[in-house]
Amino acid sequence: HPSNSQMEGGSVLERANCRAKGGAPGFKVAILGAAGGIGQPLAMLMKMNPLVSVLHLYDVVNAPGVTADISHMDTGAVVRGFLGQPQLDAALTGMDLVIIPAGVPRKPGMTRDDLFKINAGIVKTLCEGIARCCPNAIVNLISNPVNSTVPIAAEVFKKAGTYDPKRLLGVTMLDVVRANTFVAEVLGLDPREVSVPVVGGHAGVTILPLLSQVKPPCSFTKEETEYLTKRIQDGGTEVVQAKAGAGSATLSMAYAAVKFADCCLRGLRGDAGIVECAFVASQVTELPFFATQVKLGRGGAEEIYQLGPLNEYERAGLEEAKKELATSIEKGVSFIRK
Ligand code: NAD
Ligand code: LMR
């Protein structure tokens, strides 16, 4: 029997396409920016997810190499690669979930907002593609500054007439992952047993961990509260500084992105009771977007939960967070409305 590599490329591809079409139940997922620091481990982990039947890997560089590599993993999902703008529409057509880690990362000394100039245009172009080719897909937006890129995406979708606020989710899962880790460390618990809601947004003081609502119920001293809040808010900067010019969090982000994407897919499948934090269109505060716990279902973020009771420290943090968030949201909106 000829091995796959000896077979005619066409027949191998045909069988893969056939499997993708008829066979295994599952969802079609695209990663935009799949050859990047986040994109590569994210692609690998999504290839391991049994809920994924088709995985499209799009980037403006190196997509064929990453695709060839990942496609050799003996898991169910069929992997296809797409390189450059002319292949964007093909990458997006028919997708159920689109995950976007495309764009430049921070270097030491930069804020996430310093990335706006480059990443705003990238997110705009990619979201125009989504509006054209898979307007009903759930979108997980990772590209920074999330506090502005989510409003940009919303404006692009509004312009195209495809906007469904429930389906657009800014990924703040890494803040939750960090909060669970750091809080568990202080409490001497296994991080898998700890759940910390993190609300607001995804930059500096807009990242607001609600330590008064940690599960399992516990209490912290003033010093512990201040240490934990600051460490969670500065988690991204801690990694940027440690990487010393070689980029920002990629591996923990890929882990967080897959954890979040898996929740979105289980929601799409109809599983009950899936609640995670995300930066979404919201009426929880006077701001048009805000990160809180949301219930993920067939329609995306189907229910958006209120903040719950806050202590005085958190109420002060909330006011600070809202000030910065308002500016970042407005910057994103006006980038499209001009
Ligand atoms: P990276 O530079 O390693 O990778 C980015 C990838 O995007 C590259 O492969 C690049 O070719 C690709 N890209 C650039 N322009 C593109 C376009 N127009 N279309 C498709 N792909 C394009 O960066 P990274 O470390 O993977 O980080 C990516 C983004 O994620 C950054 O903006 C970073 O700040 C952000 N990030 C967000 C979080 C979060 O919690 N939301 C966490 C970590 C990083
Ligand atoms: C993070 O929180 O790690 C990301 O937003 C990347 C960064 O620039 O800090």
Image (tube, helix red, strand yellow):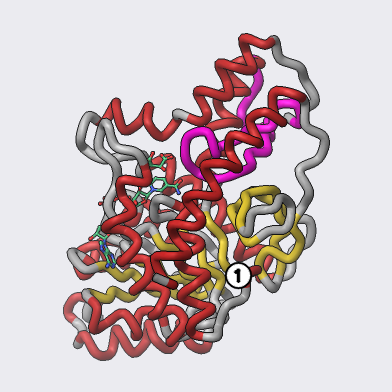
Q: Residue at x 78, y 48 (%)?
A: 306
Q: Quadrant of the N terminus?
A: bottom left
SS of the residue under disc 1:
helix
**Which residue in the structure is indicated by mark 1?**
167
Identity of the residue drawn at 32% across and 58% down: 119
> Is 18 placed left or right of 125 in the picture?
right
Classify the position of the C terminus by image quarter: bottom left
Tell me which corner region of the image, top left, top right, bottom left or bottom right, holds residue 34. bottom left
Quarter of the displayed picture in which ligand 2 can be seen:
top left
Residue 201 in magenta stretch: yes
In the image, residue 246 lies in the stretch drawn in magenta? no
Q: Is residue 120 above or below residue 171?
A: below
The 10 Å Cα crowd at callout 1, few under 14, some 14 to 19, many 20 or more, is: many
Of 72 and 226, nearer the camera is: 226
Q: Nearer the viewer, residue 79 or 121?
A: 121
Q: Is residue 303 visible?
A: yes
Classify 275 as above or below 96.
above
Mark 1 is on which residue type? Answer: Arg
Residue, far front: 338
Looking at the image, residue 173 sits to the left or right of residue 102; the answer is right
The residue lying at 18 percent from left, 65 percent from top is 61
Q: Residue at x 19, y 87 (%)?
A: 8
Q: Left or right: where does residue 261 sit relative to residue 277?
A: left
Q: Which residues are magenta?
A: 188-213
Q: Position of residue 224 (x, y in %)?
A: 62, 13
Where does the image place residue 193, in percent across and percent down from the top left? 69, 31
Residue 50, x across and y down, in percent: 54, 64
| Closer-to-camera residue (279/47) | 279
